[in-house]
Amino acid sequence: MKKIIGSISSFLAAGLLFTACERIDIEGIGELNKIELWYSPYSSDAAPLPEDCVLIDHVEKDLGISLKVVPLPSNKDEQDEMILDAARENALPDIFMVNRDVLTALVKDNKVTRVDHMYELMPERTAKMYDDTARASTSIDGVSYALSQSGSVDRNEGILIRKDWLDRLGLAIPVTLDDYYNVMKAFTFDDPDGDGLDNTYGYGAYIDIRAVEEGLGCRFAPFFGAFGVEGTFNSSKNNPGLNIHKPEYKEALQFVAKLATERLIDPKWALYTKNEFRAAWKSGKFGIMREQNAAFAMESNYKAFDENFPNAEWILINPPVGPKGYSSVGAYAPGYRNYAVSRRAQELGKLPVIARLLEWMSTDGYITVVYGEEAENYMLDDDGNVTLEGLPDPTLAYTQKAAAPLLQLRNLVFYNGNDELAARYPAWYSKNGKEMNPFKLLRDMQNCPWTISMNLPAISKELKSFYEDGVRDFVAGLRKFETWETWLREFDRLGGADWERRCILYAEENALLLDEIKVVPKEQ
Ligand SMILES: [Ca+2]
């Protein structure tokens, strides 16, 4: 604490952007220490953080800050509206979560302040949460306009292959697109499970569409990655635009169509729901898939497969390398949660107070923010670790619904660090003694090649259906590739061309076009 106060004093002495400091008097101190925070609730289906909870109490006693917290709606449009309304009325709170596009508007209207100088006031929080990439995501012309922290866990999917099938057929791990093709063929026709029946396929997928992965969705993305056209939108500076407009997209789609025609893909790909797809890999239907770390490796999820095939083994491999050397698991939009500080809070001299609050939440206050009240929602064991053992009333445990309102500010402190994720994804042993480690798998998945993209402006339902139905029909053989160019013109006529212009404009306005969109795997 001493250290923090020390750095605040030097900050004040330096007078950095702190023009109002000479106006603070005894009376002013009270106002200065009132902080209003608009947050995005951790559980949208639970009640807001109660005013009389232990967290608010601690903040007051430990920091001398009177904290008022207001939940934002869970719907993005409603969040934006609430913030834009407040901005129009000059009634923005001191600190608030804000979406990237709204932030740009607030910066233009001079409603928020730069936060560059807050980082040094929050050394531990900054080290955990605000790396260069995060800072760059809300910097405009090199100035940091929001505290941006990693949102959800990204790049948590990867290509898994049945190692036991490869071994039984004497095949090597596939590397190139041709290798993949040959392995998929063998998995389909050479009885990889050795039961004498024609009952397996090379690849399994379903239509899993996300904003960054339109068309066939993310489960097919690795094949598009081999042609350099993964994801909805290419957000590189030198080649921005919708991937569907690029000639390689047609090649990738033709490759997937060939897999479908030759029935190397489980033919139910167009019909499967997520759960049906998962039931299918658990019943040994196919030998290659793109799946998520927890959905695959958590004990509760892997169990059914383990029961069926105790001696089987899936391993993570790199996505296929295409003819020109391209390779990617798929596109992802780094999910940042941005907290902006209002211009008014800066004028009142509140930046150091806000920094003190946030640093506390990430250090001394962390356990209260994440787990609630000791001996009520959690216990500490002899080593100081959080445990549920010995809790007087287990129905109030932090894992239970009753405690959810107390934990609504968790989003403000989670940083997806090793300790947090290791706790969320515990290791365990399968029936035949293999270590299953969903956390290690996550890190390995994140070290595969990925492509950075961005969230895009919305499109009409009509255009969305035309896009999705169209590419699906080409793969299913219901449309002929000779009509591709005609179909693409119709796509543009229905709004596709305009959408591309809007995407590029949006990317330029928000500084989202990048010199390099490929995330190269780290050296192990
Ligand atoms: Ca078989």
Image: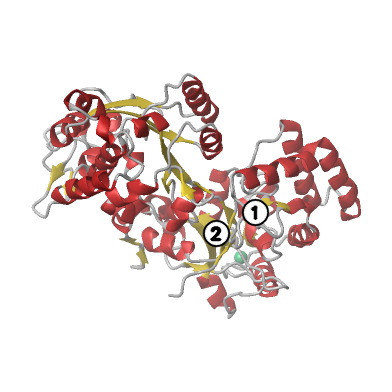
- Where residue 520 appears, as percent x and y from the top left, is 54, 68
Image coordinates of residue 501 in percent, x first then y, are: 74, 43
Callout 1 environment at 10 Å: few (<14), some (14 to 19), or many (20+)?
A: many
Q: Residue at x 56, y 45 (%)?
A: 274
- The mark tally for this picture is 2
At 75% across and 61% down in the image, what residue appears? 252
- Which mark is drawn over residue 146? none
Q: Quadrant of residue 261?
A: bottom right
Look at the numbered discs 1 and 2 and tell me whether their residues touch, using CB distance below 8 Å.
Answer: no
Quadrant in the picture for residue 297: bottom left
Question: Residue at horizontal 61%, vertical 48%?
Answer: 212
Looking at the picture, tell me which residue is in the foreground, 66 or 465. 66
Q: Secondary structure at mark 2?
A: loop
| Residue occupying image coordinates x 43% and y 75% | 524
First in residue order: circle 1 vs circle 2: 1
- The residue identified by callout 1 is 235
Q: Is residue 209 above or below residue 49?
A: below
The answer to whether one can see residue 229 in this image is: yes
In the structure shown, which secondary structural element does the residue marked by tag 1 occupy?
A: loop
The disc label shown at residue 284, or none: 2
Which quadrant holds residue 349? top left
Q: Is residue 204 above or below residue 346?
A: below
- Please, what is the three-letter code of the amino acid marked with disc 1? Ser
Q: Nearer the viewer, residue 319 or 195?
A: 319
Is label 1 or label 2 in front?
A: 1
